């Protein structure tokens, strides 16, 4: 009912700290985590990067998506210790680097978010999709969003925003403008 | 380029304009500040041990080992909290004869649903608190559990509350008279039974609360993921006996609410008590499975319906029996009866007929409580009504649009009233019907359907007309004795720099409250929208008000902002008139400049008036006290509700081999009165439609025989995802309410109200060639195959 599977009787063990070295949003970071801490626990509690959200804690809703070595992963589905040595980019890092500025602007322009709780995960998926496919069809966008649960929007504005950014990026690429 | 200028071409004319939400940029950058993000110094974390049984007596609880665990600060049981918290009872006075047991944060001796919180642990981390839960043993004596509605209504059913004579919470009856006579002489009588499953709101951010009691000052600050902070300020004050002014409730960014986050939950009440007992901040965030077993569920109705129709297809009468199962308690403070009450009062609402009879029975069972969730009662009322209308159309050989055109209340018939007693100011069913026919290209869709049927492709078209309740007046909860406000308040200030600060009691959960309030204030004051800062969600900063529920944000909150802005403008112009040696009536404000009404020439910047009033009041005439802050409240008067209306249509395809239903396209024509921000209205509608589509096809809280919730994860409980959802085409008719200056009504529930009815009718339309029909929601593939006798 309440969280973790049965713990061993010696409950000191799961809280023993382990040092994990990560590159988070471009900075080398060392975290002291418990073996049972998930990556989302580590990001939110240790590093105070609260942009990554925990929605279902089983990889179904996508609110916790972050980039690990350049690919979107569920931060709730891996332990922090498993990320040893990895490069993690969260919504805060992608915002500061400007990597998704056009996606954020288009989401804003079209109101492709309401409460905003799912939004960091949506942007991670959109970023990953557009990194792999230059001009995805609307169906391909909807398919890519199949791991992102939004209760507010009805999805259509999100699909519209991603499609519009894909078009704009393609048009800029055709003109030879650096992106 | 020669289109005539409209009102939107004036400077600062923001009402009616699709401007983006200012606060959305923050959320897009991951800079939201939700209650789940809040950490306070010395903060501890709570976790709850929950009942594995749906009904059991608590014989004993052993918490010694848990208390001894390092890092655990408190283990509390029902009796510990009962010493400081007074019980609550979820009844309203105007629901005569309604019963519900008194509730406490944690039970004293009996659990009544599987998942009910029994023991609280407060520790230095959530993980440690959960470790401690493992060390608690509870000795239960299992009692017979009442799981489904029929079982609960049986005369010899075990009682959910042993002190009651039956499992009936409430029964009521409406009767306009003459119903039996009309049915006896009608050309056609249609009868049908409907079943609506339980579903649950599933906000993406779970319930979250941080309670911070300061024993030195006897003050309580609660950071609470709620849509109604003032209501909780009142409740925490009264149930924990703390003066109201010493209780502050802060609702920052909220990750979805949909009605779910305005009810009293046992854990939330407990966390406040835990903080009082410890004198330290205590945080609790429900995890997803806890949300499934302790958030309110909704719907869960069995409806028997009869409709009498004349030979031409005119509706003559309806006769309804609605039985609804609400779980073990009625929720507090709104009660679990409101949904059923709205079902029986909204059935038939779009149609012009006089003879109506309905019985409502509200029944307890050993499950988590049901209560108000987006579009309370509307989807049930709409699905029953609209399916009956389609069946009537079939009986008399009319097209679904034609029978609706024949029966809706004519647009020139207002004001009028429904046979259930609702008074309608002005609705636009006929205009909406005409608009939908064009929007869908209805005739072409029908032709395509016929053609595809010959090729074995089974498409269906569904239509559903609806009436939505918005802008509730004090007649809604106030008359029942609940301390739930129907008024809102705003405090509007001109800052020394000439900007505007608006602290308002309506709250923001992503629907755009802050955006529309800043649009209204900027429009009315004549300043740029970016110079208006809107503050919501803090009882210490904003005036008391109802906040955001029942689609009252724009209609009531917006009108509050409008009236406050007009008062502030009058005050600004009074000072300006003194400075300029003019009459106030000769002055106006445009683009942040005081202008002459006659010439429109700028005379003085608003910022200059603020500078003079705040810093150089010595230069104003003796006796002048500049009132550049105004506080204003507004409560609806006139009609008890601002009813809205609209119509939805959808096109679906049923795979008769697998039972899968594919949504092809959805259409909405909606009339919410004055539209403040068309983009936000459309996105509210789309989000609402998708919640209705989820109810139609996917969402159902499934229970086993012993009352265990069987699908309490987001992998098992299906919610609509992008891949299954159709594009949603939206059009508007605008009939402003004359009860307010603004003329706005609500739009947040309209999408949900009719979407599942549309799909129900469309699936039945697709199944018609097979002589199959389905009247159970959600329409799962298994149910479709069963209807087709293939499963």
Image: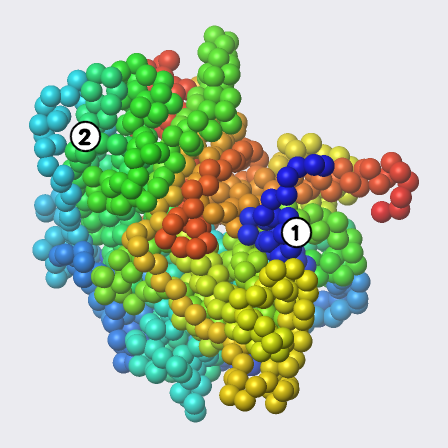
**Residue B683 occupies which quadrant of the picture?**
top right
Q: Nearer the viewer, residue B316 or B54?
A: B316
Q: Is residue B669 at all visible to an observer of this figure?
A: yes
The answer to whether residue B500 is left or right of residue B245 is right
Taking the view exactly as shown, the residue that stands out farthest to the right is: A176
Q: Nearer the viewer, residue A126 or B508?
A: B508
Q: Nearer the viewer, residue B742 or B346?
A: B742
Q: Residue at coordinates 46% horizontally, 35% vertically from top-left?
A: B669
Gap between marks 2 and 1, in whole Å? 49 Å
Chain that bears disc 2 = B
The answer to whether residue B626 is left or right of residue B385 is right
The N terminus of chain B lies in quadrant: top right
Mark 2 residue element:
strand
Q: Residue at coordinates 49% horizontally, 18% vertically from top-left?
A: B445
Q: Write down the residue under mark 1.
A: A108
Chain that bears disc 1 = A
Q: Nearer the viewer, residue B326 or B517?
A: B517
Crowding near the residue tagged with mark 1, few <14, some 14–19, many ≥20 C-alpha atoms within 10 Å:
many
Q: From the viewer's perspective, is residue B66 above or below residue B466?
A: below
Residue A159: image location, x then y, percent: 63, 40
**Residue B312 occupies which quadrant of the picture?**
top left
Residue B129: image location, x then y, percent: 46, 71
Q: Residue at coordinates 14% horizontally, 39% vertically from top-left?
A: B176
Q: Write down the residue under mark 2.
A: B317
């Amino acid at each position: 009912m309440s969280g973790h599977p049965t713990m061993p009787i010696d409950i000191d063990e799961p809280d023993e700290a382990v040092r994990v070295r990560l590159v988070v949003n471009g900075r080398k970071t060392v975290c002291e985590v418990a073996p049972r801490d998930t990556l989302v626990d580590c990001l939110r509690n240790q590093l105070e990067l609260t942009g990554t959200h925990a929605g279902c804690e089983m990889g179904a809703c996508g609110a916790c998506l972050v980039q690990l070595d350049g690919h979107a992963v569920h931060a709730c589905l891996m332990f922090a210790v498993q990320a040893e040595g990895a490069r993690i980019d969260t919504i805060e890092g992608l915002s500061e680097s400007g990597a998704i500025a056009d996606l954020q602007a288009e989401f804003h322009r079209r109101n492709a978010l309401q409460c905003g709780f799912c939004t960091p995960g949506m942007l991670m998926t959109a970023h990953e999709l557009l990194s792999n496919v230059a001009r995805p069809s609307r169906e391909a966008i909807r398919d890519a969003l199949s791991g992102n649960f939004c209760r507010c929007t009805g999805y259509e504005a999100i699909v519209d925003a991603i499609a519009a950014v894909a078009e704009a990026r393609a048009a800029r690429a055709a003109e030879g403008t650096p992106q | 380029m020669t289109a005539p200028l409209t009102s939107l071409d004036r400077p600062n004319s923001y009402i009616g304009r699709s401007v983006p939400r200012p606060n959305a940029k923050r959320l897009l950058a991951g800079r939201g500040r939700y209650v789940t993000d809040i950490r306070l110094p010395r903060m501890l974390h709570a976790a709850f041990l929950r009942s594995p049984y749906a009904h059991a007596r608590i014989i004993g609880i052993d918490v010694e080992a848990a208390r001894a665990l390092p890092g655990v600060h408190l283990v509390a049981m029902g009796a510990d909290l009962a010493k400081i918290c007074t019980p609550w009872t979820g009844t309203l006075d105007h629901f005569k004869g309604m019963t519900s047991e008194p509730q406490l944060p944690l039970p004293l001796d009996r659990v009544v649903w599987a998942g009910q919180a029994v023991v609280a642990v407060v520790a230095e981390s959530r993980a440690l608190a959960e470790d401690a839960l493992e060390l608690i043993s509870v000795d239960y004596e299992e009692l017979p559990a009442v799981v489904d509605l029929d079982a609960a209504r049986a005369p010899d059913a075990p009682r959910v509350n042993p002190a009651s004579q039956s499992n009936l919470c409430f029964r009521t009856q409406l009767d306009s008279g003459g119903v039996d006579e009309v049915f006896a002489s009608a050309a056609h009588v249609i009868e049908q039974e409907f079943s609506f499953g339980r579903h649950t709101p599933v906000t993406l951010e779970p319930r979250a609360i941080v309670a911070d009691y300061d024993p030195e000052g006897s003050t309580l600050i609660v950071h609470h993921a709620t849509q109604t902070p003032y209501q909780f300020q009142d409740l925490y004050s009264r149930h924990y006996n703390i003066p109201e002014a010493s209780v502050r409730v802060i609702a920052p960014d909220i990750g979805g609410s949909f009605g779910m986050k305005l009810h009293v939950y046992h854990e939330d009440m407990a966390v406040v008590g835990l903080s009082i007992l410890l004198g330290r901040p205590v945080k609790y965030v429900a995890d997803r499975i806890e949300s499934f077993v302790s958030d309110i569920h909704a719907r869960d109705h069995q409806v028997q319906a009869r409709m009498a129709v004349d030979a031409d297809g005119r509706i003559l009468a309806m006769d309804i029996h609605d039985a609804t199962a609400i779980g073990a308690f009625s929720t507090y403070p709104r009660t679990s009866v409101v949904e059923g009450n709205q079902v029986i009062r909204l059935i038939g609402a779009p149609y012009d007929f006089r003879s109506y009879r309905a019985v409502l029975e509200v029944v307890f069972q050993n499950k988590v409580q049901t209560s108000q969730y987006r579009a309370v009662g509307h989807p049930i009322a709409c699905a029953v009504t609209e399916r009956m209308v389609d069946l009537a159309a079939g009986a008399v050989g009319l097209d679904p649009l034609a029978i609706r055109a024949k029966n809706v209340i004519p647009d020139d018939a207002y004001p009028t009233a429904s046979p259930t007693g609702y008074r309608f100011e002005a609705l636009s069913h006929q205009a909406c019907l005409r608009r939908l026919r064009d929007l869908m290209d209805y005739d072409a869709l029908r032709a395509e359907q016929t053609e595809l049927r010959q090729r074995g492709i089974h498409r269906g078209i569904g239509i559903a007309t609806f009436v939505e309740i918005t802008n509730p007046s004090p007649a809604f909860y106030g008359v029942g004795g609940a301390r739930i406000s129907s008024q809102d308040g705003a405090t509007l200030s001109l800052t020394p720099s000439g900007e505007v600060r608006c602290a308002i009691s309506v709250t923001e959960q992503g629907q755009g409250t802050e955006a529309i309030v800043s649009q209204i204030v900027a429009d009315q004051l004549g300043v740029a929208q970016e110079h208006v800062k809107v503050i919501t969600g803090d009882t210490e900063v904003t005036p008391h008000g109802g906040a955001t529920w029942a689609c009252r944000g724009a209609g009531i909150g917006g009108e509050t902002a409008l009236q406050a802005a007009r008062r502030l403008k009058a005050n600004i112009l009074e000072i300006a008139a003194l400075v300029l040696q003019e009459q106030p009536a000769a002055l106006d404000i445009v683009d942040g400049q005081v202008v002459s009404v006659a010439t429109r020439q700028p005379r003085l910047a608003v910022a200059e008036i603020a500078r003079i009033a705040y810093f150089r009041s010595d230069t104003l005439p003796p006796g002048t006290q500049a009132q550049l802050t105004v506080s204003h409240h507004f409560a609806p008067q006139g009609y008890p509700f601002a009813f809205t209306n609209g119509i939805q249509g959808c096109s679906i395809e049923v795979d008769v081999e697998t039972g899968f239903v594919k949504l092809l396209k959805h259409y909405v024509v909606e009339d919410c009165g004055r539209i403040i921000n068309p983009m936000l209205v459309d996105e509210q509608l789309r989000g609402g439609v998708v919640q209705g589509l989820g109810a139609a096809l996917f969402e159902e809280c499934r229970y086993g025989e012993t009352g265990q919730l069987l699908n309490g994860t987001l992998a098992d409980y299906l919610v609509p995802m992008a891949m299954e959802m159709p594009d949603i085409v939206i059009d508007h008719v605008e009939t402003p309410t004359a009860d307010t200056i603004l003329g706005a009504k609500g739009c947040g529930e309209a999408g949900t109200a009719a979407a599942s009815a549309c799909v129900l009718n469309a699936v039945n339309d697709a199944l018609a060639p097979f002589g199959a029909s389905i009247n159970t929601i959600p329409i799962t593939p298994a149910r479709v195959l069963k209807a087709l006798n293939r499963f």
